[in-house]
Image (cartoon, grey):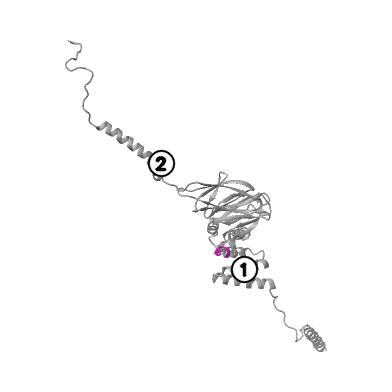
Amino acid sequence: MARHLFLDLALRIFCLTLSSATFAKPPKDEAPPTAPAPAPDAARGQRLQDQGDRAMLDMRYVDALSFYEQVRALEPNDAGLDYSIARAHQMLGEFPEALTALERFEQRASVEEKATVGRLQDLFTDLRSRVSGLHLRSSQAGARVLVRDRVIGMTPLPSSTRLGAGAATIQVELDGFFPTKRDVVLPAGGVLELELELHARSRSAMLSVQTKPPGATVLVDGQRIGTTSPSAEIVVGAGSHQLTALREGYETASSPVVLRAGSTRTVTLSLERSVPISHRWWFWSGLGVAVAGGVALGVALLTEHPPGNGSLSPGQTRAPLEIRF
């Protein structure tokens, strides 16, 4: 009896176990659980990063920079991406942008990330030697500032403005004012201090001076404004002014000019070659007189004359006798 009770109990336990397993089994049409899929932005960012890396290897630096910038929009906190952006700018010759990106990488990257790039300080040294700073002051705010024909901002410019070192033309433009420009050399690793004044069209005029031949130094009211190569330009107040052109080997040329406010005037000065002093008539006339006088004096001095009779009669010369012991 006891044995049957034991078997019955074992059977009941088996049935309960089977029933639990049956209910726990998922339906046949339900898929088994899988690992969570990566976030869409992360997957897209990785694809863009790979495309940028391939573009760098293919020397398609513009494409590479475009891919990297798209990745940064998705993952703004990726410090390693700043290094890739810096290298793309460097390959494009955009050294100020490269230096800014590399500084951002140095500030945000971990020690391990910095160790993976290698020769980081050498890269900093190279980029800094190709970058210059500009401190520009202007009499008007809100004017467009162009450097090498590219707008870089509005006045007043930030004191941290960076530009590629070397020769450049800096121009400032503002509606209602004459534009002003200056040819400069931006010092490598240094800072250029520059002040450009804007003149209102309502009170000023633009004057352009040319000379024939070119290459002359031009003065306006006694102030040197430049060399005609091919022209020298200046913005001056409306009214009367005196122009002067100087060039070695030529006579000085001068001319008055009257300028109307808001106008642009071009004046051409013709220079005449200087006549050498030996080609002037008065030089030879004076020289002839001097030569004639010199010849007459030489003839008078060198011509032999008969001796004169003197004032004493021959044989009658008298003189006191002096005896010395």
On screen, 291 above or below 160?
A: above
Residue at 36 percent across and 37 percent down: it is 289
Q: Type of residue at label 2?
A: Trp
- List the residue tagged with mark 2: 282
Q: Residue at x 57, y 68 (%)?
A: 61
Which residue, given by chain and number where applicable, does mark 1 sit on?
66
Q: Main secondary structure of the magenta part?
A: helix
Q: Position of residue 167 (x, y in %)?
A: 54, 55
Q: Which mark is residue 26?
A: none
Mark 2 Cα shell of 10 Å, populated few (<14), some (14-19), many (≥20): few
How many numbered tags mark residues here?
Answer: 2
Q: Is residue 72 left or right of residue 126?
A: right
Residue drawn at (63%, 71%) of the image = 48
Q: Which residues are magenta?
A: 88-92
Q: Secondary structure at mark 2?
A: helix
As for residue 243 lying within the magenta part, the answer is: no
Check disc 1 and report its element: helix, strand or loop: helix
Sequence-wise, the earlier of marks 2 and 1 is 1
Q: Residues within 10 Å of mark 1 (few under 14, many from 20)?
A: some
